[in-house]
Structures are given as structure tokens and as C-alpha cells.
Amino acid sequence: MIPVTRAPEPSKFNKKVRQPGRRFLKRHHVNQGDPPPANFAWRRYWSRALPMLHKSYNDICAYLAVYLDPDIDGTGNREGSVEHFIPKAQDAWMAYEWKNYLLADRRVNSTRGQEPLTCPYDLDFYPFELMLETGMIAVSEDLTPEQEEKAYEILDALGLDKEVYDAERAEYYARYKDRTREDALTNAQIARYAPFIWYEIQRQGVVIDES
């Protein structure tokens, strides 16, 4: 995870998501700031915001900091999902608020619990270091005690150190390092599709000279 700049609210969001969402909640007597009733049957108006999130955040997952294909795959699913940073179960009205949305890999989104963690929008440091060859991440050594605590909270809550994510990060670097591959990535491409890996390539001084 790396710091993310919050994108402005798209012009269509209020009409497509917030307004119908609020009308729905009012019909069910859910007041602002309240949690939803038990077994609440949500209207998933937030799904309308997914294309907006892809466009606003350049298709990059807020948690893994890698590219998410905006198209539907062969199983009818998408890589990306609308992540509610403040869970819907805590504040129903935040289910339909742009400022509460992140573009997230659906695997990470589905496993995140209710644990408190720092939002990428509020992150003002880089919490992790990357072993480029293996894709493994570790909490950065150059953090204050407070930052280190936040980094471990993020790691525990999101499981960003799972082997499957390690393998995917390692593959990105392998495609960057080996320029003989048909699917090799240039400096501009690795920066586009995997900004965290590109940050670490620069930090570790292994940028390939393309001149």
C-alpha cells in the first residue's frame, strides 16, 4: 500500500449513487450515522460507482497498488470492487458516499475485517519495503513507532503479504527485469501498472537505463 490522493467526486455520482441511496435508506427509516438493521437487504447503488473509481484512480488498487482490469473476466467477475472504508455495518449512509470509496482488488476487499487501519488517503509515509525478486513485503525499517504500528495494522487487516500477492509482485518485476520477454515492461509501463513496485525499483537504485 502506498499513499493515494483522493480524487474529486465525479459529476454523475450524486445523481447515480448518493441520491437513490439516501432515498432508499429514508424509506427504510435508517437515519444518518446509524448502522443498518440486522439482515438488511441493501440496494447496491454503489456498484454504479465502480467505472468512476477505475477512471478516477487510473485502474490502480488502493491496497495492492497494482493494475486492476476494468473488464469482466471469463467467470463474469471483475478484478476491482468498490471498497467501503468505513464499513456499511457501522454507518449505513456512508454506503453511498464517494469519500468513503476505494478501488480495491476484490480478493483483498472480501477478506478485510472490521479492524481499524489507516486509509490510503490519510497515509503520509510508505509503510512497506519490497524484496523485488521474491515479491515479499516487510514493514519498512525507517518508520517512527507510531508509523510502524499503523503498518502492522494494515498488514494484519488486509493480508498484503499472502503468497499469491508475493508471486504477482515478483512476476511484475521479472517482466521488468528481463527485457527479452514478449511481455516485458518498460519503465513507463511498470510505473503505470505497478506503482509500488516502481517506487521500490527507484528507491533501490535498479532502474534500467532506456536511453
Image: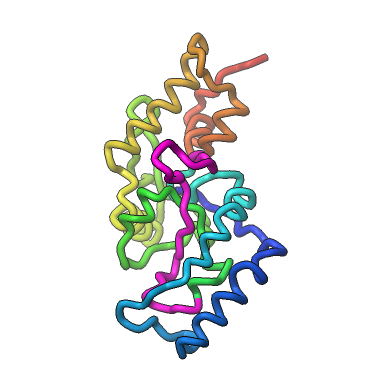
The residue located at (48%, 40%) in the rendering is 66
Residue 125 x %, y %: 49, 53
Query: In the rendered structure, does residue 107 fall within the stretch colored magenta?
Result: no
Residue 165 x %, y %: 34, 38
Q: Nearer the viewer, residue 101 or 166?
A: 101
Q: Quadrant of residue 99?
A: bottom right
Q: Is residue 142 left or right of residue 6?
A: left
Where 75 sits versus 135, above or below?
Answer: below
Q: Nearer the viewer, residue 52 or 143?
A: 52
Q: Nearer the viewer, residue 5 or 165?
A: 165
Q: How many marks?
A: 0
Query: Which secondary structure type mostly characterizes the magenta part of the structure?
Result: loop
Q: Which residues are magenta?
A: 66-93
> Furthest-right residue in view?
11
Query: In the rendered structure, does residue 78 fall within the stretch colored magenta?
Result: yes
The residue located at (46%, 53%) in the rendering is 81
Q: How is the model colour-coded?
A: rainbow
Residue 48 x %, y %: 57, 60
Residue 183 x %, y %: 51, 18
The residue located at (63%, 49%) in the rendering is 55
**Quarter holding the C terminus?**
top right
The residue located at (51%, 58%) in the rendering is 102
